[in-house]
Amino acid sequence: MSQPKTIYLKEYEAPAYHILSTELTFEIFEEHTLVINRMAIKRRGDVPVPLLLDGDDLELLCVKVDDVKIPTDAYERNEETLTLFDPGAEATVQVVTKIYPDKNTALEGLYRSGGIYCTQCEPHGFRRITYFIDRPDNMSVFTVKVIAEQSVCPVLLSNGNLEEEGSFPDGRHYALWKDPFPKPSYLFALVAGDLGRISDNFTTAEGNEVALHIYVDKGNEPRADHAMRSLKASMRWDEETYGRSYDLSVYNIVAVDSFNMGAMENKGLNIFNSHYVLADEETATDADFLGIESVIAHEYFHNWTGNRITCRDWFQLTLKEGLTVFRDQSFSADMQSEVVQRIRDVDMLRERQFPEDAGPTAHPIKPEQYIEINNFYTATVYEKGSEVIRMLHTILGEKAWRAAMDLYFETFDGQAVRTEDFLWAMQQHSPIDLAQFALWYSQERTPSLCAEHSYDPASGRLTLKLEQIVPDAVDGRKQQPYCMPLRLALLGHAGEELPLQLEGDTGAQPLLERGILLITRDEESFTFGGLASEPALSLNRHFGAPVVMEYPQEDVMNLMRFDSDGFVRYEAAQSFARSTLEAMMRGEAVSPQFLESFKHILEDESLDLQFKAQLLSLPTVTMLMQTQQTVDVHAILEASDALRREIAVACEATMRHLYALLHRPAHMGLEAESIGARALKNRLLGYLMAQQDAESIDSAMAQYEESHTMTDRLAALQLLHHGAPEAAEAPMRDFYERYSGDMLVMTKYFSVIASSPQPDTLSRVRAAMEDEVFNIKVPNLVRSLIGSFARNPYHFHAYDGSGYAFVAEQIIALDAINPMIAAGLSGAFKTYNRLNAHSRAQMRDALEKVQAHRGISKNVYEIVGKILAG
């Protein structure tokens, strides 16, 4: 294939024309859809220039200017554009296209999913519907008329408010929707089909009534109740926390099975992957319920941070996504346990984003270039982007943050803006100059912050030395030190926080009274006085800066047991477990001190149950891989499995007693205490099953058979299948027979198969791909089976290279169906440059087969090319 074109931020130019208003008519038929697009255009300059419209895979039927059909020599068409040579300074341009939703397996533009017509237009899907200036900085007012057979599509939805609806004598009907707010084409949405609905209402702070509707497949209406509760909670929270009310008379959500993303924030008509809408205790886990609450909130919050204020161009993607992730994380922290939510957020960052930052596809949260923008919907743009916003929140403080956000909303409402505009609003209320802080937007990789301290008992002084280590960029460029807020505390022997008495010039530390040091240089030293005895250092509290924190381990046991900052306590537990595992990989015995500290937490009755479950977790394989210069996956797996067995033996009696207290099979509550009880109980059963003894297997079998919640049933099934496959045969058959008609639950079944450490896992995955339930065109099923296998360290990194070969084979097959999903799967190979020589050679063979495949998409081309170049 020819090398795809690279797009650069530095080459940005505003479009020559602006589409002021857009009137769309969709005539939906069984075999095709006609799209009539009338655009009121206005040239930005005085000099006549061509009008360039984006288009992809469209059948063009007609082009008119001011209602006159223009000759073919007045325009030029190629695979990606339609160019009108001189439409005039102001005109009405009409374009008629024919599209085929049933053939659209890429799931971008208008496609059909399970009989439902729906759209996905971010980032470039709208150009697969009609010719348009398909870019975020072209904001237009949309009026949409949808016409379809009433018996096939009784529900007709689009953005905005419903203006009119009616029927025709031939059995067809129509709905006319108007969105009064200008928006870019990526926020356009349409849904048509035969759907069930639940409804509610919400009264805004201004007294406006909003009708709330969630549309689902008929029969699934009761499973949307939790989503509705989450929506109303989100609307209330955004009013109370940010003063932002909803602005239309109706808010619609539609759940579809085939969706490339989690959800999409289209103005007034959010389209969701059904995984993030449908839930009840019989079919959804506690994690599913929490995920629905978070994603519902995320898409609702986009109404202001993404829709009312949008991105000027796609390089600014973190402007809306990083900010909105921060908002949804803050909402979830208020709805659930703040410390547990923070731990979950940081775990996700470390599992997904830190490896991305360490690999060949590393990029800043605001990239300078791309080949395929779909490849930049990454953990860096979202999760690291959120952490950058969180640091701004920390620097400003709650009151100034709210004032800066109010200024941002008031100044830029209705505009397509840049990250610089957001930083301008922050700067107006910031206690410090944010020029150096802005490097977080333009630099890549994860910095380390190394800490050393010394205590002088004679003077009662502690000196803290900090060194920033900022890795070079992917292309070898040296990067500059960051400005970052470091939350810290000095702890006394009982865990109490001591006053921070910083000696010397404190003018450069305006946040010290809030327990925050501003770090700005490669190396810095701080001296604290007035200390009667040597304190313990509690650093990067609440994970205030997204860095790798490196400091001596002498206080780790006390921090693990007593630190008042829950995150630092968790961090100390993880650090102690990590050093224990690293010692085991060197052939050393398990640390008695670690086992003693583990028991201390296990027996501490004062701890919140969810928090205790987190404290008792071990570092994942992905996190352990990050500490190795040259990754040896099999050594990590052997040590991790051995430590679980050692813990189970050392703590067996306490674990069995606590498990028996917590096991309440009929209890289905969703309050924090019940969720915590299930989380801790299943953590304990996981350790006990490491022994693979009859008593533990019996406990898991009883839990599977007795439990009323999917959380407990699925946990037991996975532990049995992974640790006692013969005993698991009957439960696996039962699970399949019980849920084979429910696609969302079957994703859990396929994930259990694909994530197993058992030696026959690859053959089981291949067999599952032939199952009548599996459909490679459904992204959820692909992610659950093939994606889970690609995250399975036991088999993806198989010594014979079979795991790499299998995933490469699936990437090639998927690329012909859905390039976005294929590119996402390609990310499994991002550890390539850090593997040992044997694994790297086998991974290279697999990647080169993908790269050499004829007709490879630019989505996969970009990812694989970067990995091999690294």
Image: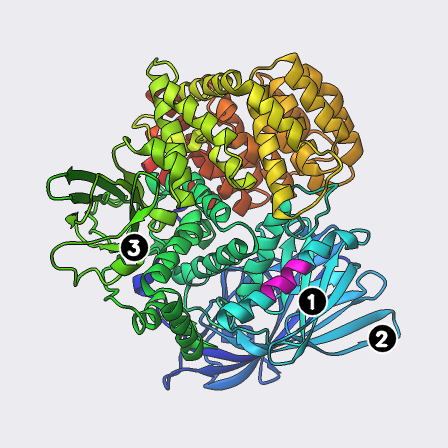
In the picture as drawn, the residue positioned furthest to the front comes out as: 532
Label 1: which residue?
34
Q: For residue 647, which numbered disc appears in the image?
A: none
Q: Residues within 10 Å of mark 2 (few under 14, many from 20)?
A: few
Label 2: which residue?
168
Q: Residues within 10 Å of mark 3 (few under 14, many from 20)?
A: some
In the rendered view, would you say 135 is above or below 791? below
Q: Residue 748, position in %: x, y?
A: 66, 36
Question: How many labels, in total?
Answer: 3
Q: Quadrant of residue 110?
A: bottom right
What secondary structure is marked by label 1? strand
Q: 595 or 343, which is in the foreground?
A: 595
What secondary structure is marked by label 2? loop
Can you see residue 272? yes
Residue 231 in magenta stretch: yes
What residue appears at the point 21 percent right and 60 percent down from the top-left corner?
509
What amino acid does circle 3 point to? Gly
What secondary structure is marked by label 3? loop
Which is more foreground, mark 3 or mark 2?
3
Is 860 positioned to the left or the right of 271 in the image?
left
Residue 837 in magenta stretch: no
Q: Residue 39, position in %: x, y?
A: 57, 78
What amino acid does circle 2 point to? Phe
What amino acid does circle 1 point to? Leu
